[in-house]
Amino acid sequence: MSQTAPIHAKDADFIPLWRFALIISIDEIEFLFYNRSMKTEEKLQLLTLHNVHEMDEEHCQFRKSNAIQDVCVSHATLPNGKKIRLFKSLITSNCKNNCYYCPIRKDNDQPRAAFQAEEYARLINNLYHAGLIDGAFISSAIQENSVRTQDLLIKVTEILRLKMDFRGYLHVKFMPGLEFEQAKHIMYLADRVSLNLEAPNAERIRYLSPDKIPFDQLIDPLKWTNTVRQNEATSANWKGHWPSVCTQFVVGGSEEMDKELLQTTCYLYTELHLQRTYFSPLTPYKGTPLESHAPIPLKRKFRLYQASFLIRDYGYSLDDFYFDHKSNLPLEKDPKLLWAEMNLRENPIEINQAEPARLMRIPGIGEKGAGKIIQMRKIHPFRTESDLAKIGIQIQKGLPFITMNGKRPAVQPALPGLLQ
């Protein structure tokens, strides 16, 4: 860690003795947004643009206030399914690395910008109190080295939580090469933490990031989060629990195969207990070595997410997926439907007897649907498709793979050429 160490989270019980809540007045908002609007707006135009693809789930929407233009607000999804509005802007775009896919790589000649820690925290706090955001995603390019850059992110997080008494959602990024104590300290203050692996393994990372640390060291912080979360949370933890953890891959940038991405995803979910893996298709930016790379089909991203959720929520393993001759998921068909076609056509599942895990293998039935089926079949066994429709389960795709009281339901042939 750098010489100026952040306040340790174990001292959080003593913070209320000197912590103060920042009261935002109209004058303060006008001071931030009007007297300094040009400077702040110029920074935001540069720094939000470069951060749009972090944790790529939905496209950012650019919100406008009476004073500031182009505030990037991402509609992120929490582990409980709730949608929230997150402010997304780098603290600085000054970067020492030369990642092949990145528009702010060191050798790409373009304008740079940076916020001071207090200025950045104050901006987030005022946007929150103005009702424009529910929280913020705190990230940065790596300026001099990872440890010092991580200290900058820690300082912003501490100002928000401990000085401004910020009650909103905070997703804080881990810099590759940070120290264990830094990671642990952030985990006391954040709602979510993340570290971008970008590639699925050591072989592929060299196609993307020649300056990054070795892959086994890159993945270490994600292992640390699993170790830290095995400790019982205390009152020193933000909201009394440990943060959720996620990562992101750049899809297509390292010529990786879907099988490699899902192999690493299986490990992250089953061994390290991450809450989410994000898949961001490569965007060929001008001025990067990958600017002439062929576009990545959006259907590939869609299929990877489907497979990822099957691993995380439905107990699928790598062996449950069908891959083509290039070890990629077929784009034309849902991986769950493919599994059913290969495994259930000759061995259909009996709706009125199967256990929940077995029911969830049927296309069209998820965890909630399986629960409804088990609850209702105790009262009245299912006999027809309409019986399932009455409890909100649309099972047209799953009809070829089930029986009801030992009988197969009538199946309407699928129209050719439709994406499943």
Image (spheres, rainbow, N blue to C red):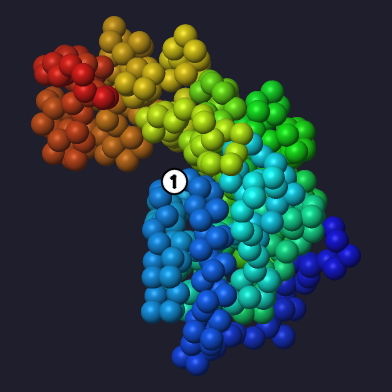
Residue farthest along the right direction in this orientation: 3
Q: Number of numbered discs present?
A: 1
The residue at the point 53 percent across, 66 percent down is: 44
The residue at the point 54 percent across, 21 percent down is: 257
Measuring from the top left, give residue 260's x and y in whole percent.
57, 22
Asked whether the viewer can see residue 203, the reply is: yes
Task: Pick the quarter of the image with the C terminus.
Answer: top left
The residue at the point 43 percent across, 20 percent down is: 329
The residue at the point 66 percent across, 39 percent down is: 99
Q: Left or right of 232: which side holds 292? A: left
Q: Which residue is mark 1?
A: 57
Q: Secondary structure at mark 1?
A: loop
Q: Nearer the viewer, residue 95 or 416?
A: 95
Measuring from the top left, give residue 76's x and y in whole percent.
44, 54
Measuring from the top left, give residue 241's x and y in whole percent.
60, 59
Picture layout, residue 128 above or below residue 330: below
